[in-house]
Image (cartoon, grey):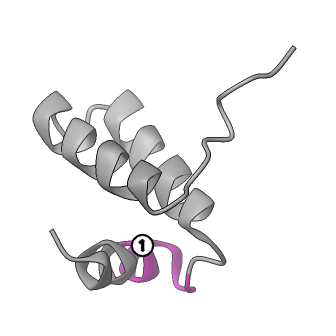
Amino acid sequence: MLISELITAYKEEKDRLPTSMNDLLDYYQQKYITGEIDIAYYRETYYFLFKKGAVSAYEYTY
């Protein structure tokens, strides 16, 4: 998986570039939640972006 592929898909749907890796992660999490991508692709994408420093907006710290 290439980061450019993730960015291209994001840009095509949102009509703008992501501002961070976090934007990409949140985008792909939403696609998984709505059933647009399967768990295997989501996991691959999640771990790839996590390694690049992405932090999910859905992660809470107490």
Q: Residue at x 46, y 41 (%)?
A: 30
Count of marks placed on residues:
1
Q: Is residue 31 above or below residue 60?
A: below
Does residue 14 show up magenta in the picture?
A: yes
- Write down the region rendered in magenta: 10-17
Q: Residue furthest right?
A: 62
Q: Quadrant of residue 1?
A: bottom left
Looking at the image, which residue is at 44% across and 82% down? 11
In which image quadrant can residue 47 be found? top left
- Quadrant holding the C terminus: top right
Give coordinates of residue 20: x percent, y percent.
62, 72
Q: Nearer the viewer, residue 47 or 34?
A: 47
Q: Is the residue marked by circle 1 packed among few (<14), some (14-19), or many (20+) residues within 10 Å?
A: some
| Rendered residue at 35%/44% (across/down) | 46
Write the residue at 20% across / 76% down: 2
Task: Give the answer, above or below, for where 57 lies relative to 20.
Answer: above
Give whichever of 38, 12 is nearer the camera: 38
Q: Secondary structure at mark 1?
A: helix
Q: Main secondary structure of the magenta part?
A: helix
Residue under numbered circle 1: 10
Above or below 9: residue 41: above
Q: Quadrant of residue 7?
A: bottom left
Estimate the x, y position of residue 57 in percent, counting from the top left.
69, 40
Determine whether, in the image, residue 34 is placed left or right of residue 37. Answer: right
Query: Residue extending furthest top?
Result: 62
In the image, what residue type sits under mark 1? Tyr
Residue 31 magenta-drawn? no
Residue 36 visible in the current orientation: no
Q: Is residue 45 visible?
A: yes
Tell me residue 40's x, y (percent): 12, 35
